[in-house]
Amino acid sequence: MMKRWLLLPLLAVISLAVLVSACGDDDGDQLKIGFLADYSGPLAEFGPEIQKGVELAIKHVNDAGGVNGQDVLLVTGDTQVDTTVALEEARRLIDVEGVHAIIGPLASSIAIAVAESVIGDAEVPTVSPSATFPALSEADDNGYLFRSTVSDEAQGRYLAELAAAEGIDNVGVLYLNDTYGQGLSGAFEKYFTGTLTSASYEDGAVSYLSELQATTGGGAEVLVAIGFPSQAAIFLREALENDIYDQFLFVDGTKSEDLIDEFGAALQGFKGTAPIGRTEAEAAGAAWNQAYIDEYGALPTRPFVREAYDAAIAIMLAAEAADTLDGPDLRDAMVRVASPGGMLVIPGAESIAAGLEAIRDGDDVDYDGAATSLDWNAGGDVTTGVMGIWEYTLDSIVEIRSFEFDLEQ
């Protein structure tokens, strides 16, 4: 295994500052945002695509004059889904790079560790676009951790409904033994009305055969696969090769094009759930979809890209609205710019530019995001969103349907 000190130069290269466009006029403090994500480890395929959402948001703001008369800068960090590395990277982003806010981390277990050990004391507002562990809203973060995605209380409920709709009444649940896996499997178990046998597994094992076999104790024929692609690649192959399972239900973490490359036809026809953005029928959803296609050619297939865009826009609108870039002021302004009562701002270059101009004129704005309304509650959570049902085909992931939900109803 590579020594930690040998990793540091590599991490420094990965996390070089990204200047998204040419610098603007030097009218005020320059906003620097950290993107604390994953470019190696179990979530390596997610980090680069989710970063596109952040970069698109920064482009829209910088094209409209930036924040405080200067272009916004982006700095990246790689957590490797490793708590020790993540804490080091969070401190580097804050203490060395001088970021004013952070987008990320992606994994729930990493988000709660960073929130409680770093960002709360440092007073750096942090928005995770993908950490879905329900209890994250109770983290000891001094009010500096937000989410632009909903908790897995929603996904667990609708995953159970999907199982029922598919006529599935006896499942084995194999889940990653971390906050993400525990939270999602617990929510699914809460709402599933059939027979359920579950087992947890640890990241980094070379085999999950014994855990797979443990989930069949109740006669299950369908495996609910909760985890990340690198782990699923191991246990799906073992399930198929050992004739343990050949039917599956998937979730956001196992919604993966890499798994299509690995298994192809063996996954064809199996469905899963994942939070997605607003639909084309809504102005915010349609505007974001068009802006993303204009920039990148096609909509993303992996989840949480829209949520990352929303996180970045909220931070930047707040930075323009706040008197300073100090953590407490920026945090409070984030709540204001995402709350009802001001001029409605939606995704897309034109609306973002109008929103920034309104703020500069002293007016209030209300950002209505690509993924959710982003009306944060006292715990830094959003409670409304859109859930998607998707399906593996022979060579792609197809969105079947989506629906809005409100966890407070």
Image: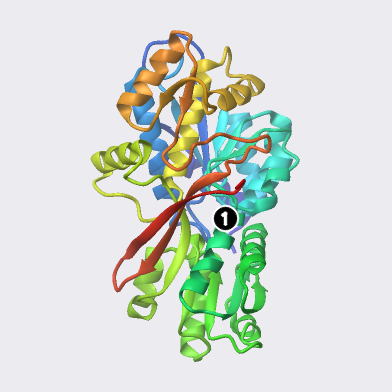
Q: How many marks?
A: 1
Q: Residue at x 42, y 70 (%)?
A: 271
Q: Quadrant of residue 206?
A: bottom right
In the displayed structure, does residue 51 sit left or right of residue 133?
Answer: left
In the displayed structure, does residue 18 sit left or right of residue 235?
Answer: left
Q: Residue at x 38, y 11 (%)?
A: 25
Q: Residue at x 31, y 36 (%)?
A: 287
Seen in the picture, residue 247 relative to 407 is either above or below; the reply is below
Q: Can I make out residue 20 in this image?
A: no
| Residue found at the far right of this picture | 140
Residue hosting label 1: 154
Color theme of the render: rainbow
Percent coordinates x, y for residue 268 in the rendering? 35, 76
Seen in the picture, residue 188 relative to 29 is either above or below; the reply is below
Percent coordinates x, y for residue 393 in the rendering? 32, 71
Seen in the picture, residue 133 relative to 383 is either above or below; the reply is below
Mark 1 surroundings: few (<14), some (14-19) or many (≥20) residues within 10 A: many
Amino acid under label 1? Ala
Nearer to the camera, 292 or 194: 194
